[in-house]
Image: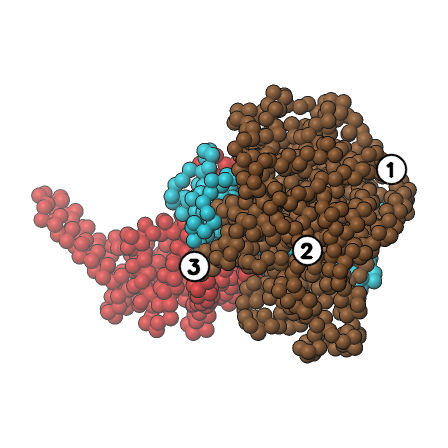
Chain colours: A red, B cyan, C brown
Amino acid sequence: MPKLPKFLQFASITKKITLALIGLFLMLFLLTHLGINLCLLRNDGGEWFRAAAHFMGTNYIVKVFEVVLFGAIALHILLALTIQIHNWRARPVGYASGSKSKTAFGSKLMIWSGLLVALFLCIHLVNFWFAKVGWNEGRYLIKVSAIEKAYKVKQQALSDAFIKTETDEERMQIEADFVAFQDGLEFFQTNEKLSDALHGGFDYITDLSKAEIREITAVLPVKYEPDFYVMVRDLFQNKWIVLMYLFFLTALCFHLMHAFQSAFQTLGMAHSKYTPIIKVVGVIFALGVSVGFAIIPIFFYFCK
Amino acid sequence: MNFTLKIWRQENAKAKGRFEIYKITDISSDCSFLEMLDILNEQLVDKIEKPICFDHDCREGICGMCSLYINGRPHGNDDDITTCQLHMRKFKDGQTITIEPWRSKAFPVIKDLVVDRSAFDKIIQAGGYISATTGGVPDGNAIPIRKTDADTAMDAAACIGCGACVASCKNASAMLFVAAKVSHLAHLPQGKIEAHERVQAMVKRMDELGFGNCTNTGACEAECPKGIKIDHIAKLNREFIAARLGAQLPKEGGSVAI
Amino acid sequence: MANLDSKIPQGTLEQKWTTYKTSQSLINPANKRRIDVIVVGTGLAGASAAASLGALGFNVKIFCISDSPRRAHSIAAQGGINAAKNYPNDGDSVDRLFYDTIKGGDYRARESNVHRLAEVSNSIIDQSVAQGVPFARDYSGYLDNRSFGGAQVSRTFYARGQTGQQLLIGAYGALSREIERKTVELFARQEMLDLVLVDGVARGIITRDVTTGEIHRHAAHAVVLATGGYGNVFFLSTNAMNSNVSAIWKAYKKGAYFANPCYVQIHPTCIPVHGDYQSKLTLMSESLRNDGRIWVPKSLEDVKEIRAGRMKPINIPEEGRDYYLERRYPAFGNLVPRDVASRAAKERCDAGYGVGSTGLAVYLDFSDAIKRLGKEKVEERYGNLFQMYEKIEDENPYETPMKIYPAVHYTMGGLWVDYELQTTIKGLFAIGEANFSDHGANRLGASALMQGLADGYFVLPYTIQNCLADQIQVPHFSTNISEFDEVENHVKARIEKLLSINGKQSVDTIHKKLGKIMWDYVGMARTKNGTAQAIEMIKQLREEFWNDVRVVGKADEMNNELEKALRLADYLELGELMARDANLRDESCGGHFREEYQTDGEAKRDDEHFMHVAAWEFTGENAEPKRNVEPLNYETVKVAQRNYK
């Protein structure tokens, strides 16, 4: 390995502590993610879940955190790889008889479980996050209130413009625009999904395709969001995808089993009284998080 | 008892090694593992073959010289012992026993089963001591030390520097060894004076010598013949964080990686 | 006789060391840098000396045979270290420690040296505490003490069952610091094969790198030998496998006198021998005698049943047990000095009361202690020793008594040194177990650590300056001089010779034969005839060795067989000298027990004829060595028969 410049050479323990701190941060994220996911289980047609997803997708503080999160994940992987490569180099010749020393559960698999989790993350991002940034086609939703708001804004804009007109030419133009706008709105009435939503008193117009979104935004510059609820529901109708998710969640479980307690150890928190508690909490956390996540695909596969 | 031995043979540090198979018969179950090797060596000498080199000295589990990796475990299949304290009664009659040297970049093989552990000395030289020059120290009872602290210091100080922690660690990490010394001295008032410099200098030296990182697998703790706990590694981490936050410069000038 | 000047300073016993220190020559810091000192051995004495000399500013080179200085056999001392701190307020003092040591040594030690030892004993504890040695403490936070054989006060400081290890780690730490500061240079895995004299002054050594077989030369203004004892002459002993006599033996053959070679300490509490494959005896700390009670069955019937395995020791009722130490020595009981306890065990076993499959063992029983203190307290005190015992014997000492038997442990004899620890060769010093000075004919428990560290930390750093003050003008030595050529050639020739014999017997086979002769004739009990016989037998065995030994492998590689052969060659000469010394010392004293000289089974000294040190002078290969004498004058102590009753 080429030698890193001096300012990039960190002490082994510094790297480990950073890894642990990031790990704990990622665990907090997992908890948040799980909390939102569990809303999916509520039999409300996705109301809570969409509300939560809406908050996460639009709040500015959350957006900043999103960047931090991606940075943290990247650094976590980078550090883990650096440490691992160093570790492999520390024993150029291995043992013929393997190792039979007792070790903590999952501790020797961290790099592999970690890489699986990283792979999982990529797949998961392709499945969901790509639709958000538009790299992938997903399903989308629009808030009914947003349509109303956009309608009012547009109408107001047109009437403001009309008042300000001075020449007939201008007036004609505005009127033409207005007619076009009204014609466009016809679409809202003719499209079944839209009219149902608008007249049914729903909060959202859900399960929209990209084409539908394009048609809508051509008429009204309305904000739209990915409809994760529908995407989740649709995705987990596929048996293989459900099994794949369960497999990767098992890897996550293995990773967390060791990660939780290990992070505390690395941060120097070992105590005859509290460490056993931390260990138990770690197991509960690992199992809780992975089982919690695992319920979603199973639930959707069997119940929706 | 009879055994088949699969032993690593390597002419010298540069030579390529290989496993050799030896049969040994009629071994008493009260025989120690090293005595079994002595018997094998006597037989090799009888046949005008080169005996197997292995490190050993006190043969009572305290010098830390013996260092064999036996059937997947440093010091063999028993807890809280060194190789010299392992007895043949722990094996099954007719068993195949694989004997390898410690494997680590920082512990190169010298010959057969003998490795060079001077890296440990170098880590200690970096600061694993209290700089008390002979003479001019206060009375032994001048500074009372809480019994629990003295006992914890003793737990850590029990390290015999055999290197089983490095040998057992999948990362060949020396953290338990370094931690034992740092923790031993950090628990004593006398050792607190230089604590910041010590931990930074020792970790720096450890990193330079090519040991791996600790990933908290606990293999070292399971194999340590003196039962040193990885709690001491947590203490080392704590000391390291305190030293870094204290932003002390390392001993004897020079710069250390953060 | 004229050259046996022990250089004892004038004045009363209490004043001698102070007087010496205030009037000795010192070397100023700038000049210290001009002086090179070689220290061989990294045990307590060697490590502490090198660290102290390095800190003073000398250029020190230190050599160790193992891969690290921390492995020296001082590490194996379990029980503790004595000091006259009188922390428990039980009446201890420097004078009492001095007196106990002289008495324990059976009035065969030099008064002035022992007093100095007692004087500096307290500083050792202070120094060690400052270095972070984790001595046992009580709940107040102050240092704890335990009692040890041969003393009626509690003056032994201890660090669990690993006192030697902890003290050595302290000294090793101090040494490591000096290595980092580059005042000391460390040479590991180097074995000293010979001493080089230039104009009769010790100026260097020849070493062999045991990893490559290369022969190296090292020059200095002075050489300090801290290479420990020679108990391995018996093949089976509690000494480490690498402990050997070669360094001091080479010094002897270059003109240093060897004093009292026959004083060998047999430790009473070792794990008994199992079979011929045994390579090493394991010591169980003497501190066990604090709480353990030693016994054998009273009736020979019970003994028979036990040996046959039909009866267990716990089944023998109280009245069927003979607590022979308590019976014979009511005042000291199980805490009599080592030589007394060892001989008492031998006496019982010889009388047929020994237990174990071989009949060469006695019981050390903790059931009373467990009843009195609780298992937990016993475990706290001796846990690691019990664990060690269980690993070896496969028996749980909490439930069944331990079996113990005496084994060779320590050699009080060694190179003769004067008050300044200088041998009869100028510029050659011997410290720690390698010298003969402080223990007389028997060493008390917990005194070896004390002596090693006293020599290294507080004595040699002073006295060596006095001896080297005239050397500051002498430039650094080159190793390219004929004296080095000559010794190196000699060393190489010897190695070649050993490799070329190609005989039939392995080194260990011959060593075991030597060990048997030594144990049978120069062991725990000796006779005039036996020792005379031993001399002849060893001569023959030496002949056999040089004609029939088989050393496989080459000179220029790591070769354990060659190392062992080189050492055995020296043991075969030393053994004879030990037998000779035992033969001519017509008395019993301490570790030297001559069957002809006893009253009621107790050692009988002959102060009139043997209150002296026998310092042997080498007179040539195959020539009889000369026995010189340093009379011992007891000015302060009233010499009496040792009485532990």
Question: Could you say whether the residue bearing mark 3 is in a helix, strand or loop?
Answer: loop
Q: Do discs 3 and 2 belong to a common subunit?
A: yes
Q: Dividing the picture into quarters, in which one does residue A181 lie?
A: bottom left
Q: Which residue is drawn at 75% across and 25% down?
A: C483
**Which numbered disc flags the more N-terminal residue, 2 or 1?**
1
Question: Could you say whether the residue bearing mark 2 is in a helix, strand or loop?
Answer: loop
Q: Which mark is in front, 1 or 3?
A: 1
Residue C253 in percent (x, y) is at: 78, 35
Question: Could you say whether the residue bearing mark 1 is in a helix, strand or loop?
Answer: loop
Distance of label 2 from label 1 (alpha carbons): 38 Å
Mark 1 — residue? C622
Which quadrant, please, contains the N terminus of chain A?
Answer: top right
Mark 2 — residue? C641
Mark 3 — residue? C140
Give amino acid for label 2.
Gln
Circle 1 packing at 10 Å, graded few (<14), some (14-19), many (20+), is few
Q: Which residue is drawn at 72% across and 44% down?
A: C612
Residue B109 in percent (x, y) is at: 69, 44
Query: Between residues A181 and A47, which one lies in front from this camera angle?
Result: A47
Distance of label 1 from label 3 (alpha carbons): 62 Å
Give amino acid for label 3.
Ser
